[in-house]
Amino acid sequence: MRQSYRGVQMADDIAGKLKSAAAWLFTQHGFTATRVADIVANAGVAQGTFYLHFENKPSLFVALIDEFFAGLIEETIARHPAKRLQTGEHLSAEVEEIWMTIIRYGRKHDILTRLVLREAYALPPEQRAHINRHFEQGADALARYLEDAQQLGLVKNLPARLIAWLLVGMIERAMHYAVFVAPNAPSVSLAGHCTEFELLGLLEPSAARTGGES
Amino acid sequence: MRQSYRGVQMADDIAGKLKSAAAWLFTQHGFTATRVADIVANAGVAQGTFYLHFENKPSLFVALIDEFFAGLIEETIARHPAKRLQTGEHLSAEVEEIWMTIIRYGRKHDILTRLVLREAYALPPEQRAHINRHFEQGADALARYLEDAQQLGLVKNLPARLIAWLLVGMIERAMHYAVFVAPNAPSVSLAGHCTEFELLGLLEPSAARTGGES
Amino acid sequence: MRQSYRGVQMADDIAGKLKSAAAWLFTQHGFTATRVADIVANAGVAQGTFYLHFENKPSLFVALIDEFFAGLIEETIARHPAKRLQTGEHLSAEVEEIWMTIIRYGRKHDILTRLVLREAYALPPEQRAHINRHFEQGADALARYLEDAQQLGLVKNLPARLIAWLLVGMIERAMHYAVFVAPNAPSVSLAGHCTEFELLGLLEPSAARTGGES
Amino acid sequence: MRQSYRGVQMADDIAGKLKSAAAWLFTQHGFTATRVADIVANAGVAQGTFYLHFENKPSLFVALIDEFFAGLIEETIARHPAKRLQTGEHLSAEVEEIWMTIIRYGRKHDILTRLVLREAYALPPEQRAHINRHFEQGADALARYLEDAQQLGLVKNLPARLIAWLLVGMIERAMHYAVFVAPNAPSVSLAGHCTEFELLGLLEPSAARTGGES
DNA sequence: CATGAATGAGGATTCATTCAT
DNA sequence: GATGAATGAATCCTCATTCAT
């Protein structure tokens, strides 16, 4: 059944209702404890209807995660291609912008963020592997970005894949922090601190002078 | 039947056999897909025996995780108390030693590492919360360490709790990298790179000169 | 849309398409495993259309079976009424003709034969009873035929209903044999053997001489 | 839990209780309509207990059928091996004894008989094939028996496999008749009539004289 | 302490059928 | 008549846990 609104087709969007309901319930009770019966009840449709829109429960979860990653990638890496960074200033500005986007994205999609960070490993192996692939692709993209910047002489010659994974961990926990630990901390300040840590590290320059070179 | 060895009670150690079997099966098939029946079969005891040693399946998992964290904390933070660091060199050396310990610990206990990193969120909410507390305590300890170092003027005045969480993420993914992605990379080199990244960041000093100050 | 052909209404014959599709699917996968969705997909119509032509899934099956029996009765018993058989020769010829017809009918309608012989008991009780009535009516007709022949002194005075049921069994398995076991055996020879067995039994006349009289 | 009775181990025989309950329910309501919940309720055990004794519902059915055929084979063909029949009299006597056994067996195990004759095709394909194999083996055994008797010159040279299948059909319907149609008819008379029909056929000898030779 | 047969609650999924368009 | 999206009842099987021996 479809409804019209100003000439725009406003489908009932049952799939959308199911996804919203499921996202909420998954974050509240976990993937395993959330029954399909709960999801359809929250979405206001019948049990069978679920299976017209999703193959099964894990599929719905995967659909949610895929959307999350697609959006995140699009708003960060995809929007900041390995473009010609000229100076460290450029890099700094860009990195900070990316951090800002990440933090805002996590806060905007806090429910999905929670799912990605905390529920993904409750999935059956097959879907779990699918999710892992997102992380691996993220790490790959970061590694390529680093390598480009290294060629430009902007960042140090640390092993790109290792650093990429460390950055993945930082991003995960930065989102975690921004969403759960300090949901009221200003995004701009979080982004600034993440950027400073990422680019300059922890060591106090004065201390570094005496102890920094390995 | 009990066996003695140098005065130490070497029980048949059914609990130990159960834990080994469970750890292995959990990493192979996941927490959910591993049945108690599988665990006892692998341990060579009867179903009922399981419940003489563990309250239930999640409890066994939690016991494994607790051991992992206890060992990790003991070998890292506990062994490097907020002692009087005098110089940046001291700090660098200590940080690198800690990274080294972490990487070696993960590789030594690769099965448990896998469990902590990949299975913990398959637990029911109650046990999940227990696991989360380990991470929070880890973040707390790191934050205290940072604050101490900040007071000594050795590290920058970034917000300690945020940075602590970023470090947690880095540690998680560094272990992930050391165990799964590059299991053959020398620990010493991994630790060195992690240290350099943590303390000095990514920015090439020459580039930093022009663009580093935020 | 209807098409005409020589004054005969050639409807799109959706019912026919549904029956063909169903017969095929039932023989391939069994009654239970065949879903209405499969039938309509094969027939190229929508789900709902099914219920404009048949009350439900079992009804369609029953319709197929009814056609099978109607045709079989018409071509055998109905065409060979309890007519005045005069001699054993007449009887023999008629019996052989009936066997021939049965075998050819089974082979011509092999799919339906398969259904009747192998799927009928997968139906719900109500429709099952309906099918059983066909067998009972067949046995009744055979019994009447035998009684007529007995009155004419052409066949032995064995209890007609018992023999009728034995003949039903023979017919079922003769069709089974002709369709599944030896689909290439010439019908005429099968019919001849069935006739000889039915009328004269297995015993070798020479052996019968010594052992035949009960 | 086991109980002792005069030194004999009287197991609770849960499998036996389940089989009895299931056989009864299958004949009453059909295989499909009988739920595992009904079976265990009738057997007085818990749902899960069912699966300690049978892999699933079809398996239980197959176990019942297998027992039926094992018993029937043992009491008929197996007990009357292709022994050296010397005369038609011997053959007649043996055939009659076998018919008697069959009829009594069907009546003794009337519930199982009903299952074999009427429910077997409600099974899923895999188990159905298993049941079919019993019939094929029965036909094979009959064919071998016939061939032996043919070599001894006791029975006519009709194609053994065809006749074997006709006999299978007769046996099925004879049991059907003896159990459902005329449960009170004396076994001995039924067996006599079946024997006479099988060995000598229907044709009245006087009529046969004029019309019997094909 | 150890056993392992018995328990029974729990839930995902299927599919015949309906009905608004 | 035809459509096909929506319905929701129906049920098998799993597996963590118990407890009599």
Image (spheres, coloured by chain):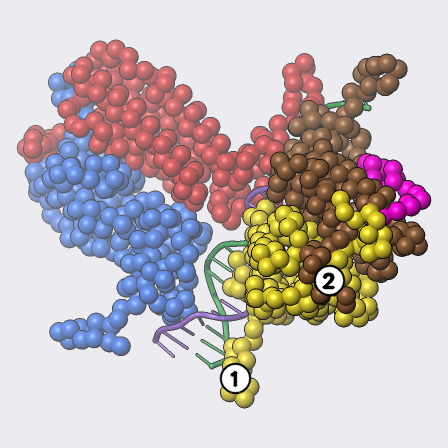
Chain colours: A red, B blue, C brown, D yellow, E purple, F green
Task: Give SS at disc 2.
Answer: helix
Mark toward the viewer: 2 or 1: 2
- Image: magenta residue range: C69-88
Q: Secondary structure at mark 1?
A: strand
Q: Residue at left 42%, top 31%?
A: A106
Residue D44 — which label?
A: none
Residue assigned mark 2 = C209
Q: Quadrant of residue A210?
A: top left
Which residue is more in the foreground, B177 or B150? B177
Is residue A109 rendered magenta in the image? no
Image position of A170 (left or right of B3): right
Q: Position of residue B80 (x, y in %)?
A: 15, 50
The Cα atoms of the two marked residues, 2 and 1, are separated by: 55 Å
Label 1 marks a residue whose chain is D
- Report x, y in % for residue C181: 61, 43
**Residue B211 shows up from this direction:** no
Specify the quadrant that holds the C terminus of chain C.
Answer: bottom right
Residue A114 in picture, x, y percent from top left: 43, 38
Q: Residue at x 73, y 62 (%)?
A: C209
Which chain contains the residue that carries disc 2?
C
Which residue is found at the position 20% from the left and 55% from the top? B74
Report the number of discs.
2
The amino acid pointed to by label 1 is Val
Residue B188 to residue B37: above or below: above
Q: Is residue B110 visible?
A: yes
- Residue F10 x, y percent position in the rendering: 69, 50
Horizontal arrangement in the rendering, residue A200 relative to residue D203 (left or right)? left
On the same chain, marks 2 and 1? The answer is: no
Q: Quadrant of residue D45?
A: bottom right
Residue D8 tag number: 1
- The amino acid beneath tag 2 is Arg
